[in-house]
Image: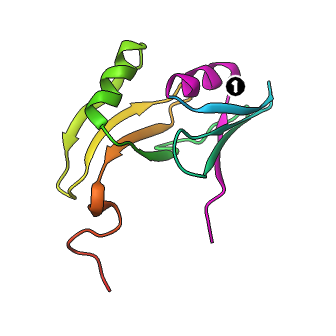
Amino acid sequence: MNLNQVTIPSSNLANAVSFYQKLGFLLIVDALPRYARFELPKGDSTFSIHHETSLPQGKGITLYFEVENLDATVSNLRSKGIVFQLLPTDQPWLWQEAHLKDPDGNQLILYKAGKNRKNPPWRIN
């Protein structure tokens, strides 16, 4: 089984599309104002957004995106006006993470995990 895509809701697709393009996503389906789909810069998965008038409440959705060089990626995105709630920080689970939110309040975590992404020392066999 292979993950094809993840779809999240947005109350304003134009704003969301602009935001995700700043992150480096390539727009491949433009059906605004109801739907947009992207290819990610690396890998085969895609990412889509659909229009909703009501968004998830509480913590909502959290998306993790792994990057090769977290410090350089965060620096580049900050130069484009992207605001981070947490700059690159080493975590006790052996990942380095930076946290930000998209225009709809969805939590995004950019991270670098290396071998610990799928093979942490506490992995069960």
Q: Is residue 13 magenta?
A: yes
Q: Which class describes the residues within 10 Å of circle 1: few (<14), some (14-19), or many (20+)?
A: many
Indicate the quadrant containing the N terminus: top left, top right, bottom left or bottom right: bottom right
What residue sits 68% from the left and 27% below the top? 11
Give above or below for 87 relative to 122.
above
What residue sits 34% from the left and 35% below the top? 99
How far across and down, in percent of the image, does residue 119 sit?
Answer: 30, 70
- Give the quarter of the image for residue 54: top right
> Element under label 1?
helix
Q: Is residue 72 left or right of residue 77?
A: left
How far across and down, in percent of the image, does residue 90 sit?
Answer: 18, 45
Q: Is residue 12 left or right of residue 35?
A: left
How far across and down, in percent of the image, does residue 13 sit?
Answer: 69, 25
What residue sits 35% from the left and 18% below the top? 78
Give above or below for 14 relative to 72.
above
> Is there any visible trace of residue 19 in the rendered image?
yes
* Camera-side residue of 108 and 105: 108
Indicate the quadrant containing the C terminus: top left, top right, bottom left or bottom right: bottom left
Q: Is residue 91 left or right of residue 44?
A: left
Q: Is residue 113 magenta?
A: no
Give above or below for 111 relative to 93.
above
How far across and down, in percent of the image, does residue 112 sit?
Answer: 30, 47
Q: Amino acid at mark 1?
A: Leu
- Give the quarter of the image for residue 80: top left
* Camera-side residue of 107 and 74: 74
- Give the quarter of the image for residue 67: top left
* Camera-side residue of 92 and 9: 92
Range of the magenta residues? 1-23
What residue sits 60% from the left and 51% below the top? 45
Residue at image mark 1:
13
> Is there any visible trace of residue 51 in the rendered image?
no
* Camera-side residue of 11 and 100: 100
